[in-house]
Image (cartoon, rainbow, N blue to C red):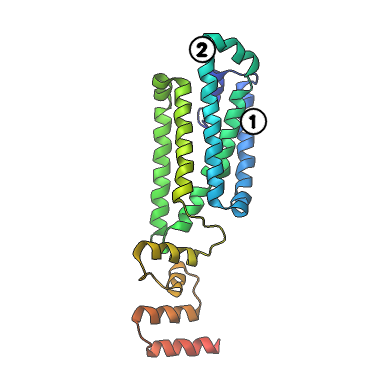
Amino acid sequence: IQSFCLDLFKTAGGAVDPQVSAITVGCVQLIALLISGYAMDKWGRKKVIIFSAVLMGTAEISLGKYHFLKSQKDYQEFVENTLSWVPLTSVVLSMMGFSLGVGAIPFVMVGELTPAHIKSHATGLFNSFSQLTNFAILQTYYVFIEHLHPYGTFWLYGSVCFTMALFAWFLIPETKGEHLVDLERRLTRSAIGPDSPSPEQLKVELGVASTKDKCAATSASSGCVSMVDFRCLEETNGD
């Protein structure tokens, strides 16, 4: 929608000039993006993603319904006279939902949900997959328009959004208010069982360990208290 916004408004028609509509969408998207940080800290990542996906799905299903009625000869006059506000409203709500949650929060959560030792690789893979997905959507948009018609295309996009909301509801954990160390320990324990790293070892991996934490991590990894551990304790007490 963002890439083909102007063309979309020209195809859909409506009471507002297509260029003005595109500018309006950009302004609303910017405001929603600025609000997204406050929203995810206030209500949590999971709730905002679900709300965002449902809002996008509802808006795109509505846009598909508009195109469907416009394609029916019996409803063309009704659509032009009564529903001319639907294209702009639907696109604004869809892009607002995207900027509020779906477009921003996954990039935050990928850093929160991946272990420290693979975080850089996971972030790179996630960004690569995101760009490939965007490329695929751009290349298939007009193919869908030709074979599914505009209403079928937006109904498909809306269905994907609702599927994403279900995915977030059942599978995405809430990370609001959790320390990275606690979060990584909980997720690692659930993945590999009770032999997961200790909190001190995780702090060392994350680069937030104190001298005392480093001593405890050394003891945990070796399974015994060595002379190095006593020297660490002496340094800690001296500090």
- The residue wearing badge 2 is 72
Task: Determine whether 200 is above or below 228 in the image.
Answer: above
Q: Position of residue 116 (x, y in %)?
A: 42, 63
Q: Position of residue 80 (x, y in %)?
A: 61, 14
Q: Amino acid at mark 2?
A: Gln
- Nearer to us in this view, 25 or 43: 43
Q: Identify which residue is drawn at 36% across, 61% down.
A: 191
Q: Identify which residue is drawn at 48% across, 58% down.
A: 112
Task: Determine whether 187 is above or below 220 in the image.
Answer: above
- Nearer to us in this view, 167 or 99: 167
- The residue wearing badge 1 is 24
Q: Position of residue 85 (x, y in %)?
A: 64, 22
Number of numbered discs present? 2
Task: Please tell me which of labels 1 and 2 falls first in the chain.
Answer: 1
Q: Identify which residue is drawn at 51% across, 77% down.
A: 210
- Nearer to us in this view, 83 or 141: 83
Q: Identify which residue is drawn at 56% across, 34% down.
A: 94
Task: Determine whether 94 is above or below 79 in the image.
Answer: below
Q: Amino acid at mark 1?
A: Thr
61 relative position to 135: left or right: right
User: CA separation, marks 1 and 2?
Assistant: 29 Å
Q: Residues within 10 Å of mark 1 (few under 14, many from 20)?
A: some
**In this orientation, does residue 117 appear?**
no
- Nearer to us in this view, 172 or 181: 172
